[in-house]
Image (tube, rainbow, N blue to C red):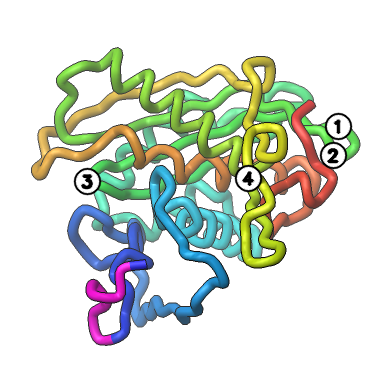
């Protein structure tokens, strides 16, 4: 979209949340780590959406970290903690949601949990999703616990609203969000063909605001969107034993209950 901003053929925006340091830093300490990408030009001009590249990057990282934890037979929370010993702010928001969700205790009958965390736009965020699943095709999201450390919190009520609104964006994208191209143009032209979640589908969101005073100040309008999908996808795996690696869920015959 902005060729002038390429850096030796590399698109810096692609690596949001995957950088070694800065306001879009990767949250794990893994030796011998290589993160790369392959660019391709789509048939229509792309543009930004709220959250930009963190939305897919968080799915890549946090769903894969969950897969790794299960592959070695470890609890997903404890597996992450072992790789975050020198990432105290990343770890703090993850611990906060795990504590409030009582991760170490069994979930209520029929409820399954998934978690995710990420860092972007100078803010550290994490979420635990609690869901139930019917016949592997109907998902009800009962509760979302979300922690955010934006550095400073001037208006906590506004932050709570931004975080809740972020899950409207993130969950709508997870279940419905898709643009298809035919004849060189996008087929979806309005909300009759591009769906968004309804009030009845919206889960309860419990926001934990934990400013640590770090600088530069972080944002609150975009960072939390990215943890919505991986938290729910990881919970879905815990419920069904199935990994979903492409979205939207509607293409898998999965919908809100």
N-term mark: 1 or 4: 1
The label on residue 145 is: none
Magenta segment boundaries in residue numbering: 2-8
Taking 234 as reference, is 196 above or below it?
above
Give the Cα distance between marks 4 and 2. 17 Å
Residue under label 1: 134
- Above or below, 176 against 62 in this view is above
Residue at 29% across, 55% down:
85
Cβ atoms under marks 1 and 2 closer than 8 Å: yes
Where 19 falls versus 37 (above or below)?
Answer: above
Q: Earlier in the sequence, mark 3 or mark 1?
A: 3
The crowding category of the residue bearing disc 3, from other C-alpha atoms within 10 Å (few below 14, some 14 to 19, many at least 20), is many
Q: What residue lies at 47% left-to-right and 36% top-to-bottom?
A: 127
**Of marks 1 and 2, the one in the foreground:** 2
Which numbered disc, 4 or 3, marks the residue that appears first in the sequence?
A: 3
**What's the distance in space between the residues labelled 3 and 1, CA to CA?**
38 Å
Q: Which residue is at a point 40% across and 53% down the rendered structure image?
A: 48
- Marks 3 and 1: which is nearer the front? 3
- In which quadrant of the rendered image does the C terminus lie? top right
């Amino acid at each position: 979209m902005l060729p002038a901003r390429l850096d030796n053929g590399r698109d810096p925006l692609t690596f949001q949340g995957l950088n070694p340091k800065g306001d879009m830093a990767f949250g794990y300490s893994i030796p011998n780590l290589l993160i790369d990408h392959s660019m391709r030009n789509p048939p229509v001009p792309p543009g930004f959406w709220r959250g930009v590249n963190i939305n897919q990057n968080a799915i890549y990282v946090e769903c894969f970290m969950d897969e790794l934890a299960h592959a070695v037979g470890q609890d997903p929370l404890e597996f992450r903690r072992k790789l975050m010993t020198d990432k105290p702010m990343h770890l703090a928001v993850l611990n906060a949601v795990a504590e409030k969700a009582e991760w170490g205790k069994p979930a209520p009958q029929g409820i399954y949990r998934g978690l995710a965390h990420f860092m972007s736009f100078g803010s550290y965020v994490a979420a635990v999703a609690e869901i139930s699943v019917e016949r592997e095709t109907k998902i009800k999201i009962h509760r979302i616990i979300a922690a955010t450390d934006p550095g400073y919190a001037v208006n906590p009520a506004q932050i709570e609203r931004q975080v809740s609104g972020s899950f409207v964006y993130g969950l709508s994208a997870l279940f419905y969000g898709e643009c298809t191209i035919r004849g060189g143009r996008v087929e979806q032209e309005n909300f009759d063909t591009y769906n968004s979640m309804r009030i009845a589908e919206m889960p309860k969101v419990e926001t934990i605001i934990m400013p640590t005073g770090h600088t530069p100040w972080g944002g609150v309008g975009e960072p939390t969107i990215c943890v919505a999908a991986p938290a729910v996808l990881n919970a879905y795996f815990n419920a069904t034993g199935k990994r979903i690696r492409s979205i939207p869920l509607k293409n898998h015959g999965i919908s809100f209950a």
